[in-house]
Image (cartoon, rainbow, N blue to C red):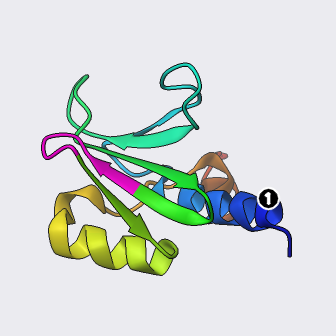
Amino acid sequence: MSDRTHEADLWKQVSGLLQRRQGWTFQGIPSPGAPPAWCFGSGRESELSVTVEEGSVCVYVVEADEEVRLAGTEELVDWLTTRWPTALPEQREGVSDRLKAGRLFEWE
């Protein structure tokens, strides 16, 4: 598997983990030249950002100005659970989940 394919797969895994979780937002281009990022925080202030660079999951802790490199999403889950437990609430159901469960429309 090429490095580019590995990074794309890793990014999909990170997105699958963080999407539809309260407090997380996707920023396609947070600043010029920067990779896309998932950001966690309350209001407009980000506390964490997560990107994929050079085959690693990179977590940036804003307040500490610290970057942590992790091997994959399992390490990301462990790190968040240990250091930032509020950043991993249950995922909200998406439209496709409700549709699959037959709860999107209720017919009378």
Number of numbered discs overlaid on the protein picture: 1
Where residue 56 sits, quadrant-wise, is bottom right
**Amino acid at circle 1:** Arg
* Left or right of 35 on screen, residue 50: left
- Residue 23 on the magenta span: no
Query: Observer-nearest residue: 25 or 103?
Result: 25
Where residue 49 sits, quadrant-wise, is top left
- Residue at point 68%, 53% (across, down): 96
Relative to 104, residue 31 above or below: above
Relative to 96, residue 77 above or below: below
Badge 1 crowding class, 10 Å Cα cut-off, few under 14, some 14 to 19, many 20 or more, is few
Where residue 68 sits, quadrant-wise, is bottom left
Relative to 71, residue 15 above or below: above
Q: Position of residue 27 (x, y in %)?
A: 51, 31
Q: Position of residue 46 (x, y in %)?
A: 26, 34
Read off the residue under disc 1.
4
Query: Observer-nearest residue: 5 or 100?
Result: 5
- Residue 60 on the magenta span: yes
Which span is picked out in magenta? 59-65
Q: Secondary structure at mark 1?
A: helix
Q: Position of residue 87 (x, y in %)?
A: 26, 57
Residue 94 seen in the current view: yes
- The quadrant of the rendering that contains the C terminus is top right
- Residue at point 85%, 69% (across, down): 2
* Left or right of 30 on screen, residue 63: left
Q: Residue furthest left?
A: 63
Residue 102 seen in the current view: no
Query: Observer-nearest residue: 87 or 106?
Result: 87
- The quadrant of the rendering that contains the N terminus is bottom right
- Residue at point 50%, 76% (across, down): 71
Q: Position of residue 43 (x, y in %)?
A: 22, 26
- Residue at point 19%, 58% (across, down): 86
